[in-house]
Amino acid sequence: MKEWNRKEILVTTGMAAAVICLVVLFFFRTSVYTGILSAVLGVFAPFIYGLIIAYLLHPVSTFLERFMYRTGPAVKSESLRSRIRFVAIVLSILLMFGLISLLLRAVIPQLVTSISDLVKQMPEGMARIESWIDSIIKEESAVEIQEILNELTEYLQNYLQTTVLPGLKRVMTSVTSGFTGIISVLKNFLLGVIIAVYLLLSWDKFGLQLKMVNYALFPEKWSAWISEEARFTDEKFSGFIFGKLLDSLIVGVLCFIFMMILKMPYGLLISIIIGITNIIPVFGPFLGAVPATVLILTVSPAKALVFIVFVIILQQVDGNIIGPKILGDRLGLSAFWTLFSIIIFGSIWGIAGMLVGAPLFAVLYDIVRDFILTRLRRKGEEEILTQYEESEGHEAIAREAVRNEKEG
């Protein structure tokens, strides 16, 4: 009978615990479990905010810090280096608040105006849709559709009176009770900004401390593997997030230019909606196009049709030209696995899951793939490895060979 050593027991126990946690997370999200999880996340919320803010601002602050080094005189004093880093961090945070302020100033007035206009123009919009349909179909068919539209108008009016208005009253009455929640979010965000400053000031030191803990707790080959996976995870997440942000910015600008040229209604609001939702892979364009089309439809059905055609063309250009140029093959996932990850993580974490699902699954996919490749190599299945290398290219095999060298 095989005798297990301490390392094998530790690894097996850790894997079993991870599997159990995943099973509970996916299938048994009971009220007790979610309550405990919510309590834990509530306690650590400022640190989670701070870590996310620091991770997003680190490339910006690093760029500003290097820019000041290049443009200024040679810096030899360590205290002066710390001051330069602090200035770069403050500038990056001010840039973040500036972008948030510009976004809110652009969205909120447009949103309020759009909702107000939508309510006022609903009867007129329905009449426009009627006349537009009357102009393109036969008279006898128009009578039937007119009856449907009349019923739809009556249903919408009843829905507004019986559901929307009472719902708005309930929302207004719940604002006071939800005020504490809003204050809590703002408090956690502001504390997160302060925590992010400390993290960014000692970013290299914290990274070295994590490396020390890694190599102190695990054997050398496992430590090398963990370091490699951490680097790979950072590469996937940072490349995907910042690439997607740039891609979505370009898509939003192109949409705004198109809306201005054709004098489409709600141009700025719709462009922001299209740009923000484009961050979500696969489903993002559809999530943004639906409310945008509804807004335009209330003003001009013909322009709504033109907008639908434009969105289809824009997404084809983005998916085949802009996106590949910016993102390349950063995730290393096929279209099926990308869709799979978005659906699975989206069902668990909602919009946040749809945002991080693809890069997170790419990391999990890479871990499983490396495990399978290592097992096949140890079993001497060179034929299967050769077939995989020919189908997937040399990158995966090369990375796996590097890890084998590190493991010795």
Image (spheres, helix red, strand yellow):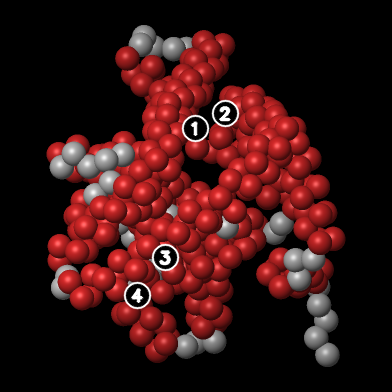
Q: Which residue is mark 2?
A: 200
State the mark number for residue 144: none
Helix, strand or loop for disc 2: helix
State the mark number for residue 151: 3
Residue contact at pointers 4 and 3, CB within 8 angstroms? no
Indicate whether 2 appears above or below 18: below
Q: Is residue 214 visible in the rendered structure shown here?
A: yes
Report which quarter residue 48 is drawn in.
Answer: top right
Pinpoint residue 88: horizontal percent, then vertical percent: 47, 20
Report which quarter residue 309 is drawn in.
Answer: bottom left
Label 3 vs label 2, nearer the camera: 3
Going by the numbered disc 4, the residue's amino acid type is Glu
Q: Earlier in the sequence, mark 3 or mark 2?
A: 3
Helix, strand or loop for disc 1: helix
CA–CA distance between discs 1 and 2? 8 Å
Q: Earlier in the sequence, mark 3 or mark 1?
A: 1
Quadrant position of the N terminus in the picture? bottom right
Q: Is residue 62 visible in the rendered structure shown here?
A: no
Quadrant position of the C terminus in the picture? bottom right
Going by the numbered disc 2, the residue's amino acid type is Leu
Residue contact at pointers 1 and 2, CB within 8 angstroms? yes
Pinpoint residue 22: horizontal percent, then vertical percent: 70, 68
Q: Earlier in the sequence, mark 1 or mark 2?
A: 1
Q: Which residue is mark 1?
A: 57
Pinpoint residue 25: horizontal percent, then vertical percent: 71, 66
Q: Which residue is mark 4?
A: 392
Q: Earlier in the sequence, mark 1 or mark 4?
A: 1
Q: Is residue 134 left or right of residue 117?
A: left
CA–CA distance between discs 4 and 2? 38 Å
Going by the numbered disc 1, the residue's amino acid type is Leu
Pinpoint residue 353: horizontal percent, then vertical percent: 55, 57
